[in-house]
């Protein structure tokens, strides 16, 4: 996550939040069988991997993804985390009203191209900010 930019960890008794300007993602449940990751986005994802979605306000959707094996820490999940960092953590969603281009792209209206959502497995993104 730190390759996305500055990230502050906000641990609590049962979770760890990832914060830039605001909390954008976190690990909300860990057990012997896996963990649940929360991802904040300004749009609702429709995907089989999303267990549930909360909509606490008009600009915020919290998606919950269950991870039970290392292979599930893939480019798709990391792409959602990268988008969450940029749009919610850095609050770029506030710079435009039009944030949804497509189900798998971030908006170019705030300077995010789909190529910026490319990840390696060591960290956040291949592009250096």
Image (spheres, rainbow, N blue to C red):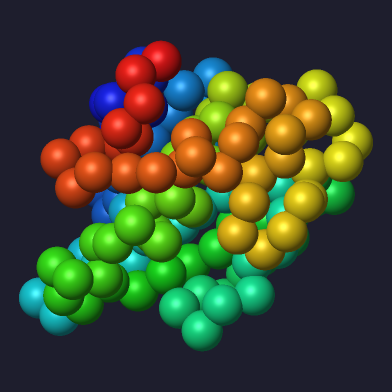
Q: In this view, does 8 lie above or below 50?
A: above
Query: Which residue in the rendered view is the most extreme toward the front?
Result: 115
User: In this view of the protein, which residue sits in the foreground, 79 or 30?
Assistant: 79
Examine the rendered structure and indicate whether residue 74 appears above or below residue 41: below
Q: Position of residue 37 (x, y in %)?
A: 37, 60
Which residue: 29% across, 26% down? 3
Describe residue 9's horizontal placement relative to residue 109 as left or right: left
**Residue 70: quadrant of the picture:** bottom left
Residue occupying the point 49% across, 39% down: 115
> Residue 34 lies in what quarter of the image?
bottom left
In the depicted structure, whether residue 71 falls above or below residue 99: below
Left or right placement of residue 31 versus residue 83 in this view: left
Quadrant where the N terminus sits is: top left
| Quarter of the figure that contains the C terminus | top left
Q: Can residue 40 be seen in this view?
A: yes
Residue nearest the observer in this picture, 90 or 82: 82
Q: Is residue 39 above or below residue 12?
A: below
Residue furthest to the right: 97
Residue 40 is situated, as x and y percent measured from the top left of the image, at: 57, 49
Q: Is residue 17 visible?
A: no
Image x and y of residue 120, in percent = 24, 43
- Residue 43 position, x and y percent, is 73, 55
Residue at (39%, 59%) from the top-left corner?
77
- Seen in the image, is 65 located left or right of residue 30? right
> Residue 52's image quarter?
bottom right
Identify which residue, 68 or 46, lies in the foreground: 46
Q: Which of 74 and 21 is in front in this view?
A: 74
């Amino acid at each position: 996550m730190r390759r996305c930019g500055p990230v502050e960890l906000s641990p609590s008794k049962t979770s760890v939040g990832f914060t830039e300007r605001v909390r954008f993602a976190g690990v909300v449940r860990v057990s012997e069988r896996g963990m649940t990751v929360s991802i904040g986005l300004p749009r609702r994802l429709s995907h089989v991997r999303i267990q549930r979605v909360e909509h606490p306000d008009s600009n915020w959707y919290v998606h919950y993804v269950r991870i039970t094996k290392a292979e599930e820490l893939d480019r798709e999940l990391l792409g959602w985390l990268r988008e969450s960092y940029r749009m919610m953590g850095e609050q770029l969603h506030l710079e435009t009203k039009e944030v949804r281009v497509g189900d798998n792209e971030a908006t170019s209206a705030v300077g995010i191209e789909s190529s910026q959502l490319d990840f390696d497995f060591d960290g956040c993104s291949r592009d250096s900010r």
